[in-house]
Amino acid sequence: MYLIGLILIYIISLRNISRPKYTKITKKNLEDILYWGMISAIIGGRLGYVIFYKANYFYNHLVEVFYIRNGGMSFHGGIIGVIISMYCYTKNKKISFWAVSDLIAQAVPIALALGRIGNFINGELCGTPTNLPWGVIFLTTNDNIYRHPSQLYECILEGPVLFIIIQIFLYKKTRLSGQTSAIFLIFYGILRCIGEIWREPDYIIYIYNSNYSMGQILSILMIISGFMLYYALSKKK
């Protein structure tokens, strides 16, 4: 799913760099960005999972940090890794970071949707119990309980829905460089928080007698960061 997603991001982004706003980004630049972005997404995704979700466990089992075959990847860690790699690349090549970020943000939802389909196929990140007729028994849970196919819910929210929202924003003629990235951060965070309602949380944080999953906490931080970025870019107009 990662590979198929990468190919689709490449195809969509290759089409978009023909537009006037992105003419300074060459095909070679795009290929380099996706190559390093893929590597940094895997490294960041794994380290994010280790740090955000199971820091205590991996502190006592350091060698297992490298056991990616056993699962454990964090989107939030992955996006941090991608941002760092894009910043380093654009700074080295003297290309606009925001132009690259906006370009990639337009295509990423398609890859996210594929990733969620992969989660569903693997029977991981399962939903909470349900009596609804489309409930699914996941063999990986070993409990014979019908659960929400939350992976598919998130597939729809983080894929087609997010993609459409970004496309609608792109029709705004007064948008500034970087604001597409901010919209991605804001709405991914919102849609992820919604999707997590039906998902069995990996890790719970107790705040003021309310239960929040780690995914929701990190997504709330994304939303705040997105609004701050959008506001900061608007002030530069």
Image: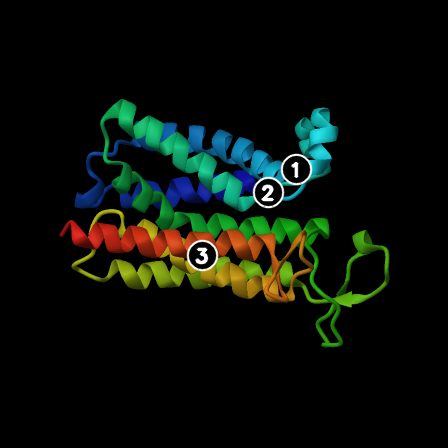
Q: Position of residue 121 (x, y in %)?
A: 69, 51
Residue at horizontal 46 percent and vertical 35 percent from the top: 81
| Residue sitting farthest toward the bottom | 132
Q: Which residue is label 3 attached to? A: 188
Residue at horizontal 74 percent and vertical 72 percent from the top: 130
For marks 2 and 3 on the same chain, the one whose residue lies earlier in the sequence: 2
Q: How many marks?
A: 3
Residue at horizontal 71 percent and vertical 48 percent from the top: 122
Q: Position of residue 175 (x, y in %)?
A: 20, 56
User: Nearer the viewer's eye, disc 2 or disc 3?
Assistant: 2
Residue at horizontal 34 percent and vertical 27 percent from the top: 88
Q: Secondary structure at mark 1?
A: helix
Circle number at residue 127: none
Q: Quadrant of the N terminus?
A: top right
Q: Which residue is label 1 attached to? A: 55
Binning the other alpha carbons within 10 Å of mark 3 as few (below 14), some (14 to 19) or many (20 upward) gives: many
Q: Which residue is label 2 attached to? A: 52
| Residue sitting farthest toward the front | 208
User: Nearer the viewer's eye, disc 1 or disc 3?
Assistant: 1
Residue 45 sits above or below residue 60 on the image: below
Binning the other alpha carbons within 10 Å of mark 1 as few (below 14), some (14 to 19) or many (20 upward) gives: some
State if disc 2 and disc 1 touch (CB < 8 Å).
yes
Q: Amino acid at mark 2?
A: Phe
